[in-house]
Every structure is written in C-alpha cells, then in structure tokens.
Image (spheres, helix red, strand yellow):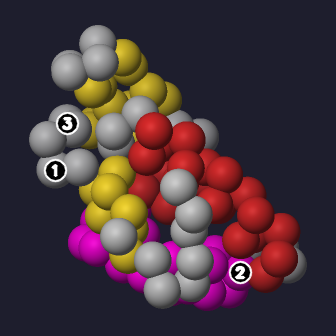
Amino acid sequence: MVIHSGSVIARNKNIPTVEIDGEIAMMNAEKGKYYGMDAIATRIWMIIREPVRFRTIIETLTHEYDVSKEECEKDVSLFLCKIYEEGLIDIK
C-alpha cells in the first residue's frame, strides 16, 4: 500500500474500540486479534474519527508534537500501513 498526501484514511467502522487510561484498545473479531495503541497511535486514531486525508494527519501531528514533517510522514505511513494490513482502516 502506497500512501500519498491525498490518500484518504478511514477507520473500519466494524472494529469496536474502547479507551483505557487515555489509550485505545480494539479487537478485530474476524482475525481474532486484540490491539493496544500507545499515546501517539491513539492520537492518530482520534484524528481519523472521520475520513481524513493523510496530509491533514501530518499537519495536525507536526503542529502538536516536536517532529519534522519528513519523520512524521515516514512514521505515520508505516503505522497506517501496518493497521491497514490488519484490517483496522481503509486507505483510498
């Protein structure tokens, strides 16, 4: 999966999530897997509450955290590809 600035990222609405101590946990029943997200992953999950372009995620995170745009794009892209492969999001 190649993600570019105009890619639209959307949650899989069939994945139930719960917030525990400020972090997100979820279960993909189809795969029988449980996922726990750290603070940054939880923030990304909150940003994609509604479908959003990749560039918007990057703009938000670089504004909120002390990270370069290039590093943010690389790290977020890797994270999104991983959770895409797990069926947690859709990328268009």
Task: Please provide percent x and percent y for residue 64.
Answer: 66, 78
Which numbered disc, 3 or 2, marks the residue that appears first in the sequence?
3
Task: Please provide percent x and percent y for residue 75.
Answer: 73, 58
Would you say the residues marked 3 and 2 are in contact, meaning their CB atoms lie under 8 Å apart? no
62 vs 47: above or below: below
> Looking at numbered disc 1 in the image, what kind of residue is underneath it?
Lys
Quarter in which the C terminus is drawn: bottom left
90 vs 69: above or below: above
At x 25%, y 72%, the residue is: 50
Would you say the residues marked 3 and 1 are in contact, meaning their CB atoms lie under 8 Å apart? no
> Looking at numbered disc 3 in the image, what kind of residue is underneath it?
Pro
Residue carrying label 2 = 62
Magenta residue check for 54: yes
At x 57%, y 84%, the residue is: 5
Q: Residues within 10 Å of mark 2 (few under 14, many from 20)?
A: some
Magenta residue check for 84: no
User: From which residue to which does the magenta span run?
Assistant: 46-63
Q: Residues within 10 Å of mark 3 (few under 14, many from 20)?
A: few
Q: In 3D space, how far apart are the residues under numbered discs 2 and 1 (Cα atoms)?
A: 26 Å
Residue carrying label 1 = 13
Marking on residue 16? 3
Residue 41 seen in the current view: no
